[in-house]
Amino acid sequence: GSTAVLTLENGAKNLLTEPEFIDTDVFCKWIDEHPELTSLVITGAGRHFSHGADVSLFSGSDTDGISRKLEKTRKLLCIIENLPLITVAAINGGCFGGGLEIALSCQFRISSKRSFFGLTEVMHGVVPGMGGMERMYRLLGKEKALMMCLRGEMISASDAKQYGLITDIAEGNCLESAFEFIKSLTEGKSTLQIRSIVETINNAARLEEDPSKGKFEAV
């Protein structure tokens, strides 16, 4: 239909063997070829969303290679963040490190009751490298973002909801709840309306001048 689903699938924990979890050019081409889309859901196969990067990636000495990979991923997450679509992370189970950074690139996060969250790469002697720290700050404010980033601790879904890290906790299946949430936002509205609204808010978030210019006339 009008909702695309991107599923992270790599072993029991959906580890990010490569930070760029989907080829950026392939992803952009696919989105462009489906102008009927109003929304994108990112989820994880099986029990977990993603436990983040494979920690063995940190043991090598090729820092330039890792830096290039991270830069490509930062570009991909910026593209997702600025899509003219409603973007929702449907989070089941563990959502740690790079997995949480992916979820933070979405506008909304719907979680299962048994999910846990954290930027746990801090415990491995590194810092989040996919834009998660700044997104955490923009979402939670300075105090809570600093605590989440420095402690690297895992928090429950209920604590994440209280922090403002997630939008809602699903009573049942988080993916089905994400679809219902999208329906509550899009029902009775045209694709052009939805895309115009999302694009305007994205433009405003980037502090563009006159972000809604021409939108009323186009719709």
Image (cartoon, helix red, strand yellow):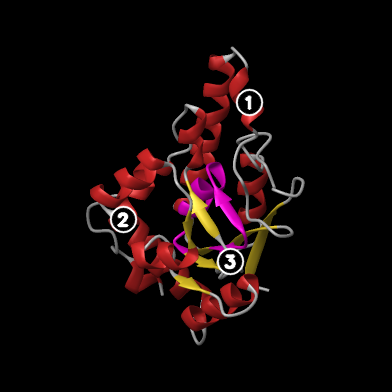
* Circles 1 and 3 in contact, beta carbons < 8 Å: no
According to the picture, the residue beneath numbered tag 1 turns out to be 57
Residue 98 located left or right of residue 5 = left
Amino acid type assigned to the residue bearing label 2 in the image: Leu
Q: Residue at x 31, y 55 (%)?
A: 140
Q: CA distance from mark 1 to mark 3?
A: 28 Å
**Nearer to the camera, 196 or 173:** 173
According to the picture, the residue beneath numbered tag 2 turns out to be 140
- Which numbered disc, 2 or 3, marks the residue that appears first in the sequence? 3
Amino acid type assigned to the residue bearing label 3 in the image: Arg
Helix, strand or loop status at disc 3: loop
Nearest to viewer (mark 1 / mark 3): 3
- Eyeballing the image, is 153 above or below 90? above
| Few, some or many residues within 10 Å of mark 3 (<14, 14–19, 20+) | some
- Eyeballing the image, is 63 above or below 39? above
Q: Kindly identify which numbered label has been placed on residue 117.
A: none
Q: CA distance from mark 2 to mark 1?
A: 29 Å
**Quadrant assignment, res 49:** bottom right
| Few, some or many residues within 10 Å of mark 1 (<14, 14–19, 20+) | some
Q: CA distance from mark 2 to mark 3?
A: 21 Å
Q: Residue at x 61, y 69 (%)?
A: 36
- The magenta region covers 89-108
Magenta segment includes 102: yes
Amino acid type assigned to the residue bearing label 1 in the image: Leu
According to the picture, the residue beneath numbered tag 3 turns out to be 114
Residue 211 located left or right of residue 191 = left
